Structures are given as structure tokens and as C-alpha cells.
């Protein structure tokens, strides 16, 4: 069965960095785009970034452009999110999610999430 | 950015009753619209994609409709496990955007 397992969350000071990981299994990782979606405490969902199946292209929401980098290692079935220059407003549960299929950017499987808290 | 507006914010429904949730896009998203269900402490779950196609294993009491800017999620007869928050999401334009959610609660 499909499994997405995030790790790497924690408490970090404003301006700091954190790297999230998402280990994928149960599907052909190399044929799916992968996303990061976040949810601030008590708030709604916000899409953060997408990387295409082969890593050829990446897309970001405006608020993280230049600060966050999405990447993947297809040999290890792992997705990453490098987060730099973190701000208080980046505090959220970060979910990795897989797209349903190429060209359809709905998310058919999600991980359980990892909590990032940006605070001094 | 396409703004997705869901209504109502909260829907109070008795078990066995019908629930109708609305989602409006600030510009056309064709049928590139998905619905998700989220329960407390859990990740979202895909219910509907392509505005009207049920995800694998989803009970037939869930249905989606609409195109362009107006969309509806209908739950024909609410079961206890359906009380949750529901989000719509458009994937027609960058950035991908979600509605703010509709909470379906027990009346």
C-alpha cells in the first residue's frame, strides 16, 4: 500500500533552516509529481511546492520562493524540502502528497505530516 | 491567484440528512477541482477529482458536480464518520489553491 512518511520537523529560530524528508513506498515514485502542502495550527491547507516526476521542473507558492527548495532522490524514493530564512508564519504541519497522475494535480495520498515551529 | 470560496463555513446536519457544500472559484477552473475530507489530527483524504469523479473506494453517497466557477459536494445521507472539515482545491492554475473549508457538524 502507498505510504508517505515525513520527518525532520522541529523547533527552529526565526531566520534558521530546516530540511524535511518524505520517504515514499508502495507506488512507482519515479512516475509521480510530489508536493508539499502545509497547514498552520487551526487553519486551512496551503499548497507550498511541486516537483515533477523526474525533477525537471519545480513550482512554488510566492511566499516561499527564494527561501524553500523542493528536491527528490528517485534512487532513494525520497522527497525533500529545504527551508531557509524561516519566519514565524512558516509554522505549520507540513504534509507531503503525491499527485494522482501526470497532468492531474489532485493529491491522492498524503503523509501524516511533520510539525515545524518557528519561534525564538 | 485563483481564490476559492467555500460556503457555508459551518453546516449543522443531523445523521441521515443530506449535506450540500458549495465552492466558488474567482475565475474558471474548468473541471480541475478536487474535494478533500479532513478529520481532527489526520491528513486530508481525497474524495473527488475532476469535479465529479469519486476516488477509489469512496461510498456512493458522496457526489461532486459543477464546472467553471461553481461546484458542489453532496453527501446524500450523512453517516457518523462523515462529520469533518471539507476542502475544495483547484488545480487549473498556479499556484494551486484551496478553499478555507466547510465544517460539517452534528446538529
Image (cartoon, coloured by chain):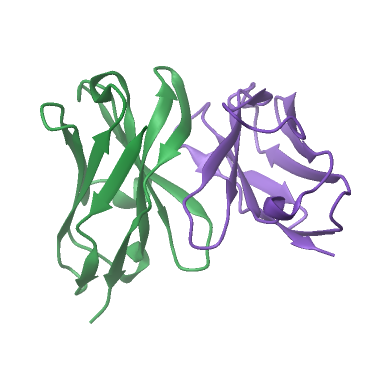
Please state the horizontal and vertical placement of residue B27, each as a whole percent of the image: 65, 32
Residue at 43% across, 36% down: A109
Please state the horizontal and vertical placement of residue A57, each as a whole percent of the image: 24, 25
Query: What is the number of callouts on the image?
Result: 0
Depth order, front residue of B69/B15: B15
- Residue reaching furthest to the left: A75
Please determine whether, in this image, residue B83 is positioned above or below residue A41.
Answer: above
- Drawn colour of chain A? green
What is the quadrant of residue A110 in the picture? top left
Depth order, front residue of A97/A112: A112
Image quadrant where one finds the C terminus of chain B: bottom right
Please determine whether, in this image, residue B95 is positioned above or below residue A66.
Answer: above
Residue at 55% across, 62% down: B40
Please determine whether, in this image, residue A118 is positioned above or below residue B42.
Answer: below
The letter of the purple chain is: B
Q: Is residue B3 left or right of residue A31?
A: right
Please state the horizontal and vertical placement of residue A33, each as a whole percent of the image: 32, 27
- Residue reaching furthest to the bottom: A120
Amino acid at each position: 500500500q502507498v505510504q508517505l512518511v515525513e520527518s525532520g520537523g522541529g523547533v527552529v529560530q526565526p531566520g534558521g533552516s530546516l530540511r524535511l524528508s518524505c520517504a515514499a513506498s508502495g507506488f512507482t515514485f519515479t512516475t509521480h509529481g510530489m508536493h508539499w502542502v502545509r497547514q498552520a495550527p487551526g487553519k486551512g491547507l496551503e499548497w507550498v511546492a511541486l516537483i515533477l516526476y523526474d525533477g525537471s521542473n519545480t513550482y512554488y507558492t510566492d511566499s516561499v520562493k527564494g527561501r524553500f527548495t523542493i528536491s527528490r532522490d528517485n534512487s532513494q524514493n525520497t522527497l525533500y524540502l529545504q527551508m531557509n530564512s524561516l519566519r514565524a508564519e512558516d509554522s505549520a504541519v507540513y504534509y507531503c502528497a503525491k499527485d494522482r497522475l501526470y497532468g492531474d494535480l489532485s493529491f491522492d495520498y498524503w503523509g501524516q505530516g511533520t510539525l515545524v515551529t518557528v519561534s525564538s | 491567484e485563483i481564490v476559492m470560496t467555500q460556503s457555508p463555513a459551518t453546516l449543522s446536519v443531523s445523521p441521515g440528512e443530506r449535506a450540500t457544500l458549495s465552492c466558488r472559484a474567482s475565475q474558471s477552473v474548468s473541471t480541475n477541482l478536487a474535494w478533500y475530507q479532513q478529520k481532527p489530527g489526520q491528513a486530508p483524504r481525497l474524495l473527488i477529482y475532476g469535479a465529479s469523479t469519486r476516488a477509489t473506494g469512496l461510498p456512493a453517497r458522496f457526489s461532486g458536480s459543477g464546472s467553471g466557477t461553481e461546484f458542489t459536494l453532496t453527501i446524500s445521507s450523512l453517516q457518523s464518520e462523515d462529520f469533518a472539515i471539507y476542502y475544495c482545491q483547484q488545480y487549473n492554475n498556479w499556484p494551486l489553491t484551496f478553499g478555507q473549508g466547510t465544517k460539517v457538524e452534528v446538529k
